[in-house]
């Protein structure tokens, strides 16, 4: 069993019980990590806090990752409360719903900027805040999707963002390796999260995924959380710059 006792993790992206961040938080908690769990704004606070209260010893923090001042304030608070960090989980992605249906060529400039800022640059921003607190090294991870490398109809600008995110993982891994900080991505199969529900024909996407994947089913948040726990642990001490698929094998199929 993975043991994360004595390690502190900050998890970004909790919205509700369907969030990948929630599956990850449960598995990290199960392994013994101390958790700081972040939600975006006051509107999401009530539902997020109810979930956080289910995890003994976990604390909730508000942080909109598109606002530098909020990121700065968060890491000041984390330093005061915990002293150091060992694990950072970035489970944040957003593009306007209008950009996630129809033809990709109609992507707007603002939609493109928003997707790249919230879904990609935020990983750089929160990693920069975490590095000074990772005094004993650490593990940073983010969440990607297969559309980063193959066309998934309707995923549109978010696919471009995920491709940028995976490239960002590689550059951060190279940049932070000398500090013994590992950076990886988990590429999960489609899950009905709050963000994913904006994607056109999501139900059909999930049906096709389950039909074609070698395991003939879809993945769930806790399975993603299990891989996150592995990446957070010393079992993955030589793994960095990688994209690890947790998609029931879908990515290996040609037809």
Image: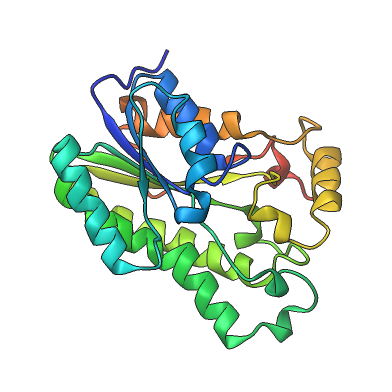
Q: Name, please, the residue furthest toward the top.
A: 1
Residue 154 in the image: state x and y as whole percent: 76, 67
Between 238 and 202, the residue placed more toward the observer is 202
Instruction: Give the vertical position of 69 relative to 254 (above or below).
Output: below
State how many labels appear. 0
Between 205 and 197, the residue placed more toward the observer is 197
Residue 59 in the image: state x and y as whole percent: 34, 34
Image quarter (top left, top right, bottom left or bottom right) of the N terminus: top left
Q: Is residue 160 among the parts visible in the rendering?
A: yes
Residue 89 in the image: state x and y as whole percent: 40, 44
Q: Is residue 178 among the parts visible in the rendering?
A: no
Instruction: Give the vertical position of 111 relative to 41 (above or below).
Output: below
At x 58%, y 29%, the residue is 222
Say whether residue 80 is left or right of residue 118: left
At x 67%, y 44%, the residue is 189
At x 63%, y 39%, the residue is 18
At x 56%, y 84%, the residue is 110
Give the color scheme: rainbow, by chain, secondary structure or one colour: rainbow
Residue 32 in the image: state x and y as whole percent: 35, 19
Say whether residue 255 is left or right of residue 183: right
| Residue 100 falls in image quadrant | bottom right
Instruction: Give the vertical position of 43 relative to 79 (above or below).
Output: below
């Amino acid at each position: 069993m993975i043991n994360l006792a004595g390690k502190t993790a900050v998890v970004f992206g909790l919205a509700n019980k369907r969030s990948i961040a929630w599956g990850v938080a449960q598995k990290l908690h199960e392994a013994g990590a101390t958790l700081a769990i972040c939600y975006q704004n006051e509107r999401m606070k009530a539902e997020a806090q109810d979930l956080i209260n289910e995890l003994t010893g976990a604390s909730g923090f508000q942080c909109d990752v598109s606002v530098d001042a909020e990121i700065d304030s968060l890491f000041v608070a984390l330093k005061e409360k915990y002293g150091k960090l060992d694990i950072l989980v970035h489970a944040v992605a957003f593009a306007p719903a209008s950009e996630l249906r129809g033809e990709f060529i109609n992507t707007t400039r603002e939609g493109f900027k928003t997707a790249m800022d919230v879904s990609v640059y935020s990983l750089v921003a929160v990693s920069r805040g975490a590095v000074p607190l990772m005094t004993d090294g650490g593990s940073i991870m983010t969440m990607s999707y297969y559309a980063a490398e193959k066309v998934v109809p309707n995923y549109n600008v978010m696919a471009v963002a995920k491709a940028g995110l995976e490239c960002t993982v590689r550059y951060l891994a190279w940049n932070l390796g000398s500090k013994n900080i590992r950076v990886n991505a988990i590429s999960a199969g489609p899950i009905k999260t709050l963000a994913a529900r904006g994607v056109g024909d999501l139900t059909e996407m999930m049906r096709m995924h389950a039909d074609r994947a070698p395991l003939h089913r879809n993945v769930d948040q806790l399975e993603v959380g299990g891989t996150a726990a592995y990446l957070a642990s010393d079992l993955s001490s030589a793994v960095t710059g990688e994209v690890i698929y947790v998609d029931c094998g879908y990515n290996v199929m040609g037809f």
